[in-house]
Amino acid sequence: MTTESEELKNIVEAVFLVADAPVSLQKLKALFPEDAAPQHDHLMEVIGRLEEEWQERGMELKKIGSGYRFQSRERYAPWLRRLNEGRPPRFSRAQLETLSIIAYRQPVTRGDIEEIRGVSVSPDIIRALLERGWIREVGHRDVPGKPALIATTQEFLAYFNLTSLRELPELSAKREISEIAEELNLTLPVIPTIEESLESEPSPAIPIESG
């Protein structure tokens, strides 16, 4: 007979397995009736048991940002990449550079990105990153024109398997954006864009050092 504790573990396991994004403890509690919501300590105990039970399996329970999800273990990535061969996501170099700048310099405006890259940023690039859910507007800079400030999202952390922005590759000196993109596992096929074909300068370095 399934005990109450085992049933809670099964519920949490099922939620983490089917969710398409990391699930926070707050969201997890909200799935239960208000008078039957599990306590924080009880949920953490259940999560600890699940982490232990899945230690020797191909999937692992991973904390991403403020939430948790099941994901394949990194050592099995070569087999999973072969499974998806033929339909990989495709990014332009300009998209990778723009995303790297936002990740390290956030919050930034489109003007900040253009100043660092040395070329104008196509609205299509920003739109593509917004549609993927990797960036969002977080406010406006208090200057004439009130340009939008852009930052990364929880979806960005989840996609790149980061618990927080502190896990971004360290910037000990000025770095080529293409090099940083590679460390972020942005090793997907890169398609040149019309914008890039007009650029004659090499990739810029991010003028910021880690603190």
Image (tube, rainbow, N blue to C red):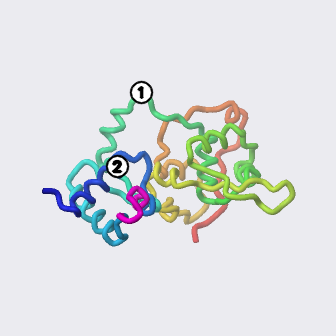
Answer with mark 2 or mark 1, whichever residue precedes in sequence: 2
Mark 1 neighbour class, 10 Å CA radius: few under 14, some 14 to 19, many 20 or more:
few
Left or right of 32? Residue 179 is: right
* 15, above or below 39, in the image: above
Query: What amino acid is found at the position of numbered circle 2 in the picture?
Result: Gln
Nearer to the camera, 96 or 11: 11
Query: At 70% from the left edge and 49% from the top edge, which residue is drawn?
Result: 117
The residue that disc 1 covers is 86
**Can residue 152 be seen here?**
yes
Q: Residue placed farthest to the left in the image?
A: 1
The picture places residue 43, in percent across and down from the top left corner, at: 33, 66
Look at the image and tell me in which quarter the C terminus lies.
bottom right
Tag 1's secondary structure?
loop
Nearer to the camera, 131 or 120: 131
The picture places residue 55, in percent across and down from the top left corner, at: 23, 57
Q: Residue placed farthest to the right in the image?
A: 144
Look at the image and tell me in which quarter the N terminus lies.
bottom left
* 49, above or below 102, in the image: below
The residue that disc 2 covers is 71
Magenta-highlighted residues: 28-36
Q: Residue placed farthest to the front in the image?
A: 35
Q: Which picture quadrant has residue 25?
A: bottom left
Query: At 60% from the left edge and 59% from the top edge, which residue is drawn?
Result: 104
Nearer to the camera, 128 or 172: 128
Query: At 50% from the left edge and 65% from the top edge, which residue is drawn?
Result: 166
Q: Which picture quadrant has residue 146?
A: bottom right
Query: What amino acid is found at the position of numbered circle 1 in the picture?
Result: Gly
The picture places residue 22, in percent across and down from the top left corner, at: 43, 53
Left or right of 60? Residue 2 is: left
Tag 2's secondary structure?
strand
